[in-house]
Image (cartoon, grey):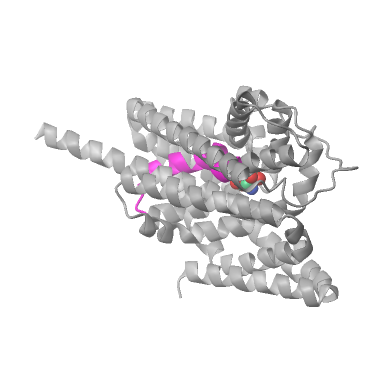
Amino acid sequence: MNLSLKIIIALVLGAITGILLNLFAPGLFTPLNAYIFVPIGKIFINLITMLVVPIVFISIALGTAGLGDPKKLGRIGLKTISYFLVTTSIAIVIGLSLAFIFQPGNVGTYNTEGLEYSSNEAPPISDTLLNIIPKNPFQAFAEGNMLQIIVLAVLFGFALTILGTKVARVKEVLEQGNDIMMFLVNLVMKLAPYGTFALIATAIGTQGFDAMKAMSLYMIVVILALIIHTIFTYGSSVLLIAKRNPIAFFKGFAPAMGVAFSTSSSNATLPVSMSVAQKNLNVPKSISSFVQPLGATINMDGTAIMQGVATIFIAQVYNVDLSVTSLLIIVLTAVLASIGTAGVPGVGLIMLAMVLTSVNLPVEGIALIIGIDRLLDMARTAVNITGDAACAVIVAETEERAANKAELAVK
Ligand code: ASP
């Protein structure tokens, strides 16, 4: 049986176990969760997270060096960032539109009295961008500051290219380090079905049906927007720009989506999503190792969708009419907020505070959606990393076509 199938079965069994325990044996759920599900889930997440920092550094340094000339790096960088920005904007617009159509905040009653949520956790986006250059590389590694590690790795890879044979041995060490990391990813992935089962059982068992029932329309709108964005935006760009079969794309990438769904973390899923893109989607290593780590850090379409729907939902609950200008501000700040969102569980909700404040909506509104956010986080993380993979496939195909054309021209 292949890994994707095992992961999907584990997801379904985990969800069923969580629901059944929550409904019929809550007393049994508590000890099972504390002594079995939580520890297994934690071990699995720690095992993959352990590999993230070295993989990001090694693969981006090698990816940059592998691209060779700086012009190519610039071109790929531009393509990647443009795709990220355009798709994230589309994502927010889909989220906003569906929230206007379904009006989740106007249907049903929500009690806003006494809600509390403190927003001082959201770091201003300017800080994230200004601090992109690490003052101390070791601190960046120790804190796992992805943007800083990426900058360092790109510079390192650039030096590898320019210095060439002089530093060939360092490059070789990195290449061997990369082999070791990929070996470990494959090893850890053998545990993925167990980890997935445990994580889903915890998430669903803890949330229960009541939380879901009260917020069902909001959940449905977010999930619908995620599905529409995945099928149309990613599917059509893979079909039209990369000229690949979108179904084969989704099928090939499914194992990574399963892991993202269960871990709710783009960062933790990165080793898996890169290895899956390289193996199943034939994305060259140099491109996958440049595009995907960058995407896992700054490209979060699923998160942007949640933030769009949540903002409108909260405006509806508090009876605030939003002007066209406010809507534009929401699109802009949600793009920035999703860039600033770290690829770890739950941060998208913290960054939502920034979007709400930008249009003077009450940040306490977050308290309404916090209860079910854990479940939506799973779905949006799967979308977040699918966007990175779609971009990697598109960059790979367009680069290959350009290379073929250049070759023909030479002949
Ligand atoms: N959990 C998401 C991710 O890692 C981020 C978020 O929206 O909270 O991609």
Horizontal side of 118 relative to 262 (left or right) equals right
Where residue 403 sits, quadrant-wise, is top left
Q: Residue at x 69, y 37 (%)?
A: 352
Horizontal side of 109 relative to 220 (left or right) equals right
Whether residue 258 is situated above or below residue 327 in the rendered picture: below
Q: State the image coordinates of residue 77 (x, y, percent, origin top left).
A: 42, 31
Q: State the image coordinates of residue 337 (x, y, percent, origin top left).
A: 63, 33
Q: Nearer the viewer, residue 149 or 399?
A: 399
Whether residue 119 is situated above or below residue 264 in the rendered picture: above
Whether residue 6 is situated above or below residue 276 in the rendered picture: below
Q: Nearer the viewer, residue 223 or 156?
A: 223
Q: Residue at x 80, y 32 (%)?
A: 120
Residue sitting at the far right: 114
Q: Residue at x 72, y 50 (%)?
A: 107
Query: Quadrant location of the C terminus?
Result: top left
Q: Is residue 362 visible?
A: yes
Q: State the image coordinates of residue 60 (x, y, percent, origin top left).
A: 47, 38
Whether residue 150 is situated above or below residue 27 in the rendered picture: above
The residue segment tinted magenta is 281-304
Q: What is the chief secondary structure element of the magenta stretch?
A: helix
Q: State the image coordinates of residue 357 (x, y, percent, origin top left).
A: 74, 29
